[in-house]
Amino acid sequence: MKRLTLKDVAKMAGVAPSTVSFVLNGKGKQMRIRDEVATRIMQVAEKSGYEPHRMAVNLRTGQSKTLGLIVESISGSFFASLAKTIETEAERKGYNVVYCSTENNAQKGGELIRMLGRQMVDGYLITPAPGMEKEIQQLVQQHKPVVLMDSYFPSIKTPYVLINNFDGVQQGMKHLISKGFTKIGFVMVDVKLIQIEERLRGYTTALKEHKIPVKKKYILQLQYHRQREDSLNELQAFIEANPELDAIFFSTNYLGILGLEVIARMGLKMPDDIAVLCFDDHDIFRLYPPGISVIEQPIEGIAKTAIDLLMHQLDKNSGPMKKTAVELPGKFILRGSA
Amino acid sequence: MKRLTLKDVAKMAGVAPSTVSFVLNGKGKQMRIRDEVATRIMQVAEKSGYEPHRMAVNLRTGQSKTLGLIVESISGSFFASLAKTIETEAERKGYNVVYCSTENNAQKGGELIRMLGRQMVDGYLITPAPGMEKEIQQLVQQHKPVVLMDSYFPSIKTPYVLINNFDGVQQGMKHLISKGFTKIGFVMVDVKLIQIEERLRGYTTALKEHKIPVKKKYILQLQYHRQREDSLNELQAFIEANPELDAIFFSTNYLGILGLEVIARMGLKMPDDIAVLCFDDHDIFRLYPPGISVIEQPIEGIAKTAIDLLMHQLDKNSGPMKKTAVELPGKFILRGSA
DNA sequence: AATTTTTACAAAATCGATTTAGCACAGGCA
DNA sequence: TGCCTGTGCTAAATCGATTTTGTAAAAATT
């Protein structure tokens, strides 16, 4: 039982293969195929269940109709929501998606991009990690359509979408301050990424705006590549060294989860002993008593915007882009922890 | 800057395209190409950074070197671990993977399979959902390589890998019973799937073996398609209707998470007011105080075995399979909840 | 020395589509 | 009548590889 080809359909309809191709690709009118012939071809194709051979189409047209989605971790919850939306959005535009994760391995990022290149993806959706700058730069120089999400490199001129980190942190900080908290710690990673810096800026700015002094010892920079246990200990030491802290802002959900563990270990109660606020939501935060208040990322919006930006690049006869840098507002979700 | 083709390499090396193809595909000896020529070709290909055009190769060879992974939900933690292992295992065998989720939509399952068929995947890895039986049956009849994971249909004769559900539940139940719990509830979904039935069988068998009567009212069957809130209420009603229950076994992690919410809502303390045990681990269970004891699935083992079984089918000159049904043991993880 | 066999490649067919160029035939116009 | 213009399709080139077939020159055999 062999695959049904366009040639077969042509034979069955009593016309040439090219004619079938024209009709099925909607170029019947343009090629002035009679309606009578066109409908006959359509019917034959329909009845026989003909499906074009993707690889053949790709080879001929040079388009794989496939997008590459590169994320840091495929098991993260950020990815989970992102992937779902991107997949459905892409599908509706006739594209499908292959996923790849760098798994926090800077070097692997480059390999991945090359691998996807070999597979001929038409465009890239990337959440950039520190080590990937060069590779992404190359893609852009090769005029491959690229959209960055969640972060970006100022040196690379390609569209990006992300949450307004500064504003998001501000929202959270304003809430904490309005609740009367003044000794607020800030926990971050030491990675040099725009979004991290923006979050820190949100923290310091909010404090300054309310005339609260910014104390350096209230800011903890955890190293990125580190044993889980080491990070926990460092975090605990930080809290013990500043017993007057009445609230902590965790700048990523990974840090927040570490925080929960340390706080439980130390026997502290949220929010009375210490209030907790976290950037970026996570399943756990909904459930973990008393519920962790967070700044939620507009993931669906990010995904949709990213696809739009990418499609715009893929569509050659669309003009130059108006907006290439999109910042979407985050949403403060109040739960029990702050 | 166009893509480098095999023809270009041939020209640069001063030979015919076919010669290059032979050499690069390791058929140089067989086609008696002189070592001198062969090494020259290799060097040229290497230096120029030539990469064969995947689509062209696919079209000619009829192999896409791509596997389709179909799961229920791409955001589930089961998928997350599964995908990672499968991806790396597949990559090492020269395959890549496209993911698809049915998102608990029976009808979508069929569409997905067809979509992947269009994309010409060489083989399928599927975690079967209730509505997919017919579609999978078709694939098998078309002699497409298929491996099922996590569950299977007795009517379909194709390899599958899953945890030994019966034994897993037994392990957990034996622990509960040894701790002195006797009034043990069992919460399950009403889906007719092998693995669910096996888990129930593990529950009842364990009770019988210890001469503990099996009471029907201690078994709750939650409906599958249901509003989250409704399920929560039904679960709460179940616990309230059986106040003598001293432990509950949740047969899936989704149910377990619902259980945590209800238990928190009712103000019960684990494990004193009620002990909790759950089938299938989840991030939350590690963190949620006092830690939820679980039966952990050997996900990595499942993934590796599945790939092996699939590769065996893809490799035509390998004989018939010895083992087509694999059951891997689960692992009981003791935490604070039971 | 003539013929066969082997060596070492090159040429051409092929996979299944898309797309450009071409080709009969009909009608319009001078 | 002869030339031009549309109409309605077909033939053939093409995408970039793999694989079958072909073919000169060298070596071996008779």
Image (cartoon, coloured by chain):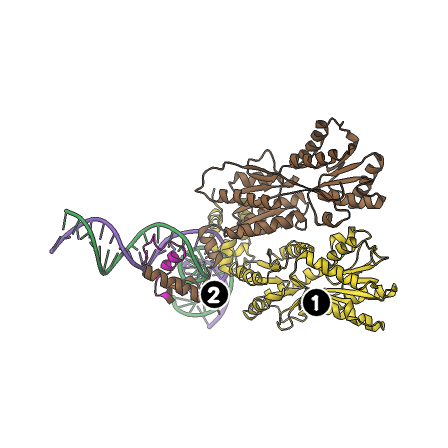
Chain colours: A yellow, B brown, C purple, D green
A168 within the magenta span = no
Q: Nearer the viewer, residue B160 or A197?
A: A197
* Disc number placed over residue A195 in the picture, else none: 1
* Element type at mark 1: helix
Instruction: Give the residue at x 62% y 70%.
Output: A158
Q: Can you say which quadrant of the picture contains the C terminus of chain B?
A: top right
The answer to whether one can see residue A171 in this image is no
Q: Viewed as shown, does residue B312 lie left or right of B250?
A: left
* Element type at mark 2: loop
Q: Nearer the viewer, residue A79 or C11?
A: A79
B27 within the magenta span = yes
Q: Viewed as shown, does residue D2 lie left or right of B147?
A: left
Whole-percent x, y for residue B129 in the image:
65, 41
Image marks 2 and 1: residues in contact by CB distance under 8 Å = no
**Picture quadrant where residue B296 is located:** top right
Q: Amino acid at mark 1?
A: Gln
Q: Amino acid at mark 2?
A: Arg
* Disc number placed over residue B3 in the picture, else none: 2
Disc 1 chain ID: A
Residue extent of the magenta highlight: B13-33
Task: Answer few, some or many: residues within 10 Å of disc 1's Cα (few below 14, many 20 plus, some between 14 and 19).
Answer: some
Of the residues tagged 2 and 1, which is closer to the observer? 1
Task: Answer few, some or many: residues within 10 Å of disc 2's Cα (few below 14, many 20 plus, some between 14 and 19).
Answer: few
Q: Nearer the viewer, residue B244 or A28?
A: B244
Instruction: Give the residue at x 49% y 57%.
Output: B54
The answer to whether residue A253 is above or below residue B308 is below
* Disc number placed over residue A14 in the picture, else none: none
The answer to whether one can see residue B105 in this image is yes
Whole-percent x, y for residue A15 in the image:
47, 51
The answer to whether residue C13 is above or below residue A127 is above
Q: CA distance from mark 2 to mark 1?
A: 36 Å
